[in-house]
Image (cartoon, rainbow, N blue to C red):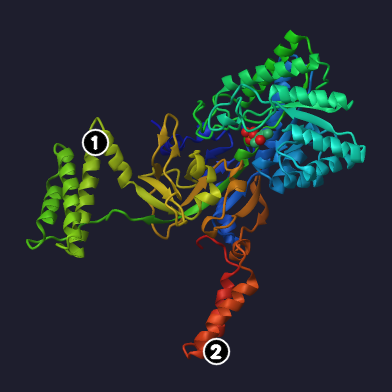
Amino acid sequence: MKNILEETIQTYGIENWGAGFFDVNKKGNLVVRPGEGEAAEADIFEIVNDLLKRGVKLPVILRFPQILSYQVRKLYNSYQTAMREYDYKGAHRAVFPMKVNPRRDVLEEVLREGRRYNFGIECGSKPELFAALALEQAPQSLIVCNGFKDEAYIRLAFIARQIGKRLIIVIEKVEELHIVLRQVQQTGVKPELGIRARLYSRGSGRWEKSGGETAKFGLTTSEMLEVVRVLRQHNMLDCLKMLHFHIGSQITDIKRIKNAMKEAARVYCKMRQMRVDIEFLNVGGGMGVDYDGSKTSFDSSANYTMQEFANDVVYTIKSVCDEEDVPEPTIVTESGRILAAFHAMIVTNIQDEIETVLDDISAVTTNEDDPQVVIELKDLVENINSKNYREYYHDALEHKEELFTLFNLGLINLEDRAKGEALFWEVCERASKFSQQSKIVTEEFDELKKLLSAKYLCNFSVFRCLPDNWAIEQLFPIMPIHKLNTTPSEHATLVDLTCDSDGIIEKFIDLKDVKETLELHHFKPGEPYYLGFFMIGAYQEVMGNFHNLFGTLNEAHVIINKNGYLIKKILPGSHISDVLMMARYDKNFLLENFNMHLEEQVKQGNLDAAAAEELRTEYMKHYEGYTYLG
Ligand SMILES: *Cc1c(COP(=O)(O)O)cnc(C)c1O
């Protein structure tokens, strides 16, 4: 027989999605490890309590730099293993795509750990490149410049070369080549160039559109030939060093990778045969993260491991090159999601439960003066059983309609309406219980179960913390970080603090399906109950927005060691002042206008000067407060 701990581990699927980083200890708390199979572990519940004692308010981002560096090593090793296995003669260079998580701490950790592997940077915009120019990276490493470019972007790229960085400008449009040529004329500096190819092959999953003939990015075959022709004409063909493609993020199906690789390797070989000495074949990103742990081609999953992905890339390129008798290129990879996703998580508290259904109907009393519809609902409550629950539930639905019709016609009062509603929900509760006990649960009662599930008010904003859950229904693992040695008794959905009905989470990871409710513990007001949101280190932080002016989160950087953990850094999230500044309410404006209101009240005799001063002080005290519930 399984014990409760094992059961909760299974309920939340930790072993499926946790990738060896997350587990549960004997106290029933979630623990985190710096890598698969590591003995060191830290109790996340303890970390959170420690932070709370230091005055750090929830929600908080926990960042584990060791997980980031573990993934950097793992990626490097996967390609090394594949290259040994298939006797690949070329090398591997990775670059970290800044758009995945442009935080300085993230870049610095990746570049520090990746220094001995010559890890570089991929950027797709001027601000990203601007930052990349200042970051410290290994001398042999690359900066790859993707994205649409103007004169200023290309100027920055030339500056990079002049300060000794090895930067490759990837031509995404033929026009960019002409800007480059003008720069060469003006500066005499010789750049290194790449071209982004438009493949027939597509990825799979949510970002399938990033690849294929009609993709937003990449040069058509004739445009590629045009670039080669123009470069040859300018005697600059030796500048063309890289062939690049990227068929989209979160590729869920490994077959798509093989196909794209075949096509890209073929393009590479044909160009080599045209005496274009391409050195780098850049295969882009796209390595998927198995968010739900199902190891399938479902949108929030991926049906392969990192090693399998690397094997397919290396093997396919190798075999096409052998066939075409062309030297093997240095393989450049731009994987971002798989490196960054695991290293950050959010912890927040359940603030309250939203009541939609009256829990206790013992206070509802009826008498003969009640409207007929109320008396009939009461009768249903009293006589519902396992044989008639279906019929009684249908009757209750009819009575509820009738209740509202009568109310809208002005025939019953608010008290009657309240009684009727309470009784109706009680019939629903009882019907739902009977249906769950029966062997076959029909769709109707599945819907009812969802309708009756608890709604937990969570101290956070979906738009800030999990934007992909809102925008594209991507799933993330969510679970309590403590109480895991007790059985969760409720089925709940989560609602956030924003005044937006989309600010809700009602899809959860499941091994075989998608769950519409999450198993959670009974919420008791005043008792702390903390939830963790996992694998948010890729894309979520930078894409989160300021809906309702909820700001960025407090943040702690945690090192895991054999004594538990060390909090290395605490960074404050947005204050009310910060988010107001962003919306162009500067401090003077706020103070002057608030003062005007105060003076008006003083003039009218509604406030004396001392009371006004007190209000002013208090107003400004809140200015430095956290934007979430305290
Ligand atoms: C977004 C992007 C990446 C990163 O993709 P992941 O799926 O996060 O690995 C790499 N290269 C390019 C060109 C991109 O646009």
Disc 1 target residue: 437
Q: Amino acid at mark 2?
A: Ala
- Identify the residue at horizontal 61%, vertical 18% (top origin): 259
Where residue 264 sits: x, y (%)? 69, 20
Task: Decide: is 96 above or below 200.
Answer: below
- Identify the residue at horizontal 83%, vertical 20% (top origin): 277
Task: Decide: is 557 above or below 66.
Answer: below
Query: From the image, which quarter does the N terminus lie in?
Result: top left
- Identify the residue at horizontal 66%, vertical 29% (top origin): 246
Where residue 364 sits: x, y (%)? 18, 60
- Identify the residue at horizontal 59%, vertical 64% (top origin): 580
Disc 2 target residue: 609
Q: Which mark is residue 484?
A: none
Q: Is residue 466 left or right of residue 319?
A: left
Mark 2 and mark 1: span between their CA atoms? 68 Å
Q: Is residue 193 visible?
A: yes
Where residue 414 sits: x, y (%)? 21, 64
2 or 1: tag closer to the N-terminus: 1
Q: Amino acid at mark 1?
A: Gln
Q: Secondary structure at mark 2?
A: helix
Is the CB–ligand 1 distance for label 2 below 8 Å? no
Q: Is residue 567 left or right of residue 447?
A: right
Discs 2/1, front: 2
Q: Residues within 10 Å of mark 2 (few under 14, many from 20)?
A: few
Q: Is residue 327 visible?
A: no
Looking at the rendered structure, the number of numbered marks drawn on it comes to 2
Marks 2,1: beta carbons within 8 A: no
Where residue 260 sits: x, y (%)? 63, 21
The residue lying furthest to the left in this view is 368
Q: Which is nearer the eye, 105 or 408?
A: 408
Q: Residues within 10 Å of mark 1 (few under 14, many from 20)?
A: few
Q: Secondary structure at mark 1?
A: helix
